[in-house]
Amino acid sequence: MSQLRQLTVLGHSVRVAVRPGTEPGPPLLLCNGIGASLDLLEPFVDALDPRIGVVRFDVPGVGGSPDPRLPYTFPLLALGVGALMTRLGYDEYDILGISWGGGLAQQLAFQQPRRCRRLVLVSTATGSLMVPAPPRVLRKMVTPQRYRDADYAVQVAAELYGGRMRERPDDVRRLMHDRSRVGSRRGYLLQLLAGAGWSSLPALPLIRQPTLILAGDDDPIIPLVNARIMRALLPHARLHVYPDGHLGLVTSADTLAPLVADFLRAGGGRCNT
Amino acid sequence: MSTSTTTRLADAAAPLDVLLVDAALGPVRRFVPDLSTARWAVSLARRPRTTARRLGALAGETAKVVVGTSDLAPRRGDRRFADPAWTENPLLRRLVQVYLASGSTVDQLVADADLDPRDRKRVRFLVENLVEALAPSNVPLVNPASAKAVIDTAGLSLVRGGTQLVKDLASAPRVPEMVDTSGFVVGENIAATPGAVVFRNEVLELIQYVPQCDEVHEVPVLIVPPTINKFYAIDLSPGRSLVEFSTQNNRQMFVISWRNPDPRHAGWDFDTYVGSILEALDAVEEITGSARTVLAGICSGGILASIAAAYLAGIGRQDRLAGVVLAVTVIDNHDAGTVTALSDPRLAALAKARSAQKGFLDGRSLAEVFAWLRPSDLIWNYWVNNYLLGKKPPAFDILFWNADTTRMAAGLHADFVDLAIENQLTRAGALSVLGQPIDLGKVTVDSYVVAGIADHITPWENCYRTTQLFGGRTRFILSTSGHIAALVNPPGNPKATFHTNDEHGSDPKAWLSGAATHQGSWWNDVSVWLDERTGALVPAPKELGSTRLQPLADAPGTYVFDK
């Protein structure tokens, strides 16, 4: 069972959910997609091996974390996340980043090489230097409308998220709305802004951690080729392509969570594929 | 911080619909001279002789102050001028005397004017706030404590205070920080009674608390907390928690934790909230196996609980209730303190439109209004402490709770404002919820009603009128102190007393004059009342939840953390 806490980190109040693992070991830190509150990842956490501890948080201005006073960047946010993990008493941890959070995860792996043990990148790419989604998809990503209006979310779910959402767009209501928290427009814009001009592309060869890349074969927001580029540039990465869309980590949690758990617990050290 | 100060702070509050109307419109509106002020000016102009006499008297008094023959002095116990320098320093003494003379002159001018009670209350409110704001004690360096602090810290106190002022003004609520929140963590040393969320829907989480006795009474208690703050007013620090006290007294406790609504939930109204209470009641019955439950409500939660009880009575399912407990709840709003003076239907409509446009009423603007209703305690006190002296505000659990604001869905806001202004619950059928006309007279189970004698939000006389509304036998308890302090009233406080009187006539004053005074807290009294209505003692359940309703999260749950 996850415990929720509101912690003050570097002067900001941050909503955090901690699920202690049943066995000792580094926990898995989840970095969420843009605009999404930590509740979205509940199905994945529920499906993940209970032996692994899980830490989730809401970025300032998103979900249950109040707006940040000033704009921030990925390196600053990574600094805050490091401080957060210290506050929680974790020195070493694994990191999983989905979509926008995948950018943060790469920044963390690069910025905290001694604290970040393994890296899982899901439905993500290399920031502003990437193969972009079609303009009609990107246009819908500029506003947090889909988090504020459930009907709109259902309407755009297939086109935006692909995969299983194409057959069951109504699921988005359950996943993204029923129990989620919605942040402010300003929080969303600052999140977009944090990614502006940022790219991990030149730094990928310097990320030495064993890395698992998960990518859906029908992800309209992050075209699959991005995963292949990351696979090529990260020295210790392997790629797993799954038959689902952008929200695969949630909609296919039953198949992807065991894969992640295996990577983190056993085979993670050897990434030769 | 002394007990008397904490009690006073805890009591600083405002009537529900004033709070709701003002929060939507912004507190500034009440500081701007309005039609009432204009009527005051006109009235004074019409009686030039009285006015001239008052001003002449002020001039005379000022002359006496200047030559040093005035014997004006701050009233005893005025903490603003407690420092001996205010009386010993000839300059400061004269400053205070001029201030006091001007203040009382303005006061007399309000009394002189020919105004209707509503205008008079509004003018008095405006004038008192201005006089309060202009006190010499609010001025840096003039206030001797501030001057001393500047010398002691080589000016650092002013730097600290200035930084704090900029920080407080940078974001709503634009009032001085009233509490040092750093020592409190929800779930650890506040809202920390063990339990689990056993049911959750879009609107609420239902928390079941771990019984802290081997045996519990068969019939459980379900508490409906207020909707304008987090639920943990009844689960503050250990030793001050009503929930903890109850679980240690053989009680099966269930408490609702409301979700903090956002713009998506603008449409949530009485139907939504009462419907959710009924869902929670279903869950309580399923978990405990008890066919009956005591339904309890606090403040605005008490209004919702009363509606839910009347709904059940209306559909013929009153047998599901073993009793109703209402704490600091006003159901009959007629002439409730300053309400009539400060809100009117036009403003109410405007307030509803404002919240409808936003989708919710912002909790931070509620906090601002809250503070400006008791400016001497909640603004200027902290103005001096935080800005002039550059000190940290105190750490106090009730104020920590108070600073943890919540939003209110626009639909609920509108329903509450209508309810208060039209006084709907006092007339059978004036309100319909979930398609059922609401008639409190049909609620014939016993009820227990508790109020605080110094309560500014829910005046006890109004709480008392509830005894005339319900159809069953009502026990009314009048506790010491005000809104929150009456609620957070753990046994052991030697100053705590409460009044009882079994003759519940229609006149609250008559009830009080015939009442007996008892030593101690009403927590013990309600415990005895509940014992008589909650059945036999049975072994306490070993696990929380039921086969179907498995625990979803540890108490205090997840909704309480929503900012």
Image (tube, grey):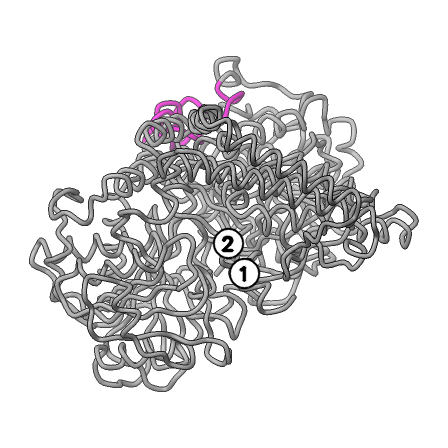
Q: Amino acid at mark 2?
A: Ala
Q: Are marks 2 and 1 in contact (CB under 8 Å)?
A: yes
* The one of B538 and B41 positioned closer to us in this rendering: B41
Say if the magenta span includes residue A155.
Answer: yes
Q: Which residue is mark 1?
A: B8
**How far from the left and from the top, in percent, is residue A55?**
59, 53
**How far from the left and from the top, in percent, is residue B499?**
34, 74
* The one of B547 and B433 positioned closer to us in this rendering: B433
- Magenta: main secondary structure equals helix
Q: Which class describes the residues within 10 Å of circle 2: few (<14), some (14-19), or many (20+)?
A: many
Specify whether residue B553 is in view.
Answer: no
Image: magenta residue range: A140-167
Q: Which residue is mark 2?
A: B12
* The one of A133 and B392 positioned closer to us in this rendering: B392
Q: Amino acid at mark 1?
A: Arg
Query: Is A221 drawn above or below residue B206 in the view shown?
Result: above
**How far from the left and from the top, in percent, is residue B394?**
67, 59
The C terminus of chain A, quarter of image: top right
* Residue at screen point 44% across, 36% down: B122
SS of the residue under disc 1: helix
Q: CA distance from mark 2 to mark 1?
A: 7 Å
- Specify whether B499 is left or right of A26: left
Query: Is B249 drawn above or below residue B127 in the view shown?
Result: below
Pointer 2 indicates a residue of which chain?
Answer: B
* Residue at screen point 57% across, 43% down: A65
